[in-house]
Image (cartoon, rainbow, N blue to C red):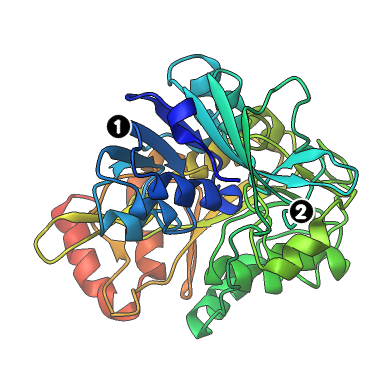
Amino acid sequence: MDIDWLRWLRPGDRLVCSHMSAEPVALLASLAACEALPQPLELMLGVPFSMAAAELPGGCTLTTYGGMGSAGAIAQRRPVRLSPLTYGRAAAVYTSGAWQCDVALVALGRAADGRLFLGPSHGAVLAAARRARHVIAQVSPAVPCLRGAEWPAELAIDALLETDAGPPELAEPVPGATEQAIARHVAALVPDGACLQVGIGSLPSAVVQALEGHRHLGIHTGMLTPALWRLVTRGAADHSRKGADFGMAVTGSVCGDAAHYAALDGHPAVALRDPDHTHDPRVIASQPDMFCLNSALEVDLLGNMNTEAIVLPDGRWRFVGGVGGLPDFIRAAVQAPRGQAVVALGARTPRGQPRIVARLSGPCSIAASDADVIATEHGVARLRDATLDDRARRMLAIAHPEDRDALAAQARSLGLL
């Protein structure tokens, strides 16, 4: 049975969706098909993985955490508001009342015993739902039920849409030669027993593949991908040296294909946790040898990073990434015993544009004061506690060889050398 939206929605309502692999795609499609949908409405999509929200009527304002997931593609079809909120505050803004939620839209799984579980991405929706007037859910037996994601018995669900659909699937990226070269540099930095936070994409996948010979690794991450899970199944990760959540892989989201979701369904050594835990600086900093690996679109000679936007020929920014949880992990990792925060990227884009630059062309997502380690296929630059001239020299050494002379000249004109 479909949802009677006229019963539950009022003009001006603010809706919050579970997101990523817990995106309520069926509910969004139902909303789009409602001919008399109350408007205006505001929808917080977080990080969408599908294009379902693009079909909503024009009176629905969409907000995302930057251009991650399918948000960038949606923004090419209709206006999208972008929030630079760090993921560590995603739940806190609803708990505190700083952001409002009138109606929460959630994707849930149903276990064989009838219990309901939040879909495989936690996010802020539970915090939002606790303050909402109504909670509307799509429920599917094909959604994995993960430890830590049990739907709270005291949180009433006002309307249910039954579906057989599983979570949105992501194809596993295939690393190329550049990614594999970077991975060799990065893997050499990871000690046995390190606790890993790894982003998503071909470069993180290449690094994780290079770690399969390590032992006693732990996982505390925002996204648990098939590549990261293989460290567990192949004996590299047993979480035996973690300072918190001993013996458990902790994640804010499980992302992958149907086989990955099925493998983690009910797994006793995997816990899905909300941003207040996964991105809590105290939890991250309690992990000995915390090792965070992420990427950026460009990094300047001082270590300032743009993770959000590329520049179009007309000078406008096109948002293809976001801030996400990067500031949370970078700042906390360097507080952990022997912690490291690595940002890795190719020295040039596939089209040959430099990615190590004198000045950022896009927004500064991470300030140089937070930079720790930068890696390209040409080596590793350690920036923590380094002076500005040392930073510039170290960044020049990992830039593309054909870009170094021009970069050095720019560095001199800026007074860095």
Residue drawn at the location 75% of the way across and 38% of the way down: 149
To which residue does mark 1 refer? 39
Q: Which mark is residue 328?
A: none
Can the viewer see residue 372 in this picture?
yes
Nearest to N terminus: mark 2 or mark 1? 1
- The amino acid at mark 1 is Gln
265, 270: nearer the viewer? 265
- The amino acid at mark 2 is Pro
Residue 271 coordinates in the image, percent (x, y)? 79, 43
Give the answer, above or below, for where 259 lies relative to 80.
below
Distance, label 2 to label 1, CA atoms, is 32 Å
Give the answer, above or below, for where 230 lies relative to 417.
below
Can the viewer see residue 307 in this picture?
no
Q: Which mark is residue 141?
A: 2
Name the outermost residue toward the left.
314
Name the outermost residue toward the bottom.
177
Q: Residues within 10 Å of mark 2 (few under 14, many from 20)?
A: some
Q: Are marks 2 and 1 in contact (CB under 8 Å)?
A: no
Residue 75 coordinates in the image, percent (x, y)? 29, 54
Residue drawn at the location 89% of the way across and 46% of the way down: 247
Q: Secondary structure at mark 1?
A: loop
Residue drawn at the location 79% of the way across and 63% of the way down: 262
Residue 377 coordinates in the image, percent (x, y)? 48, 75
Residue 121 appears left or right of 391: right
306, 151: nearer the viewer? 151
Residue 242 coordinates in the image, percent (x, y)? 82, 43
Residue 95 appears left or right of 196: left
Residue 300 appears left or right of 188: left
Residue 233 sits in which quadrant?
bottom right
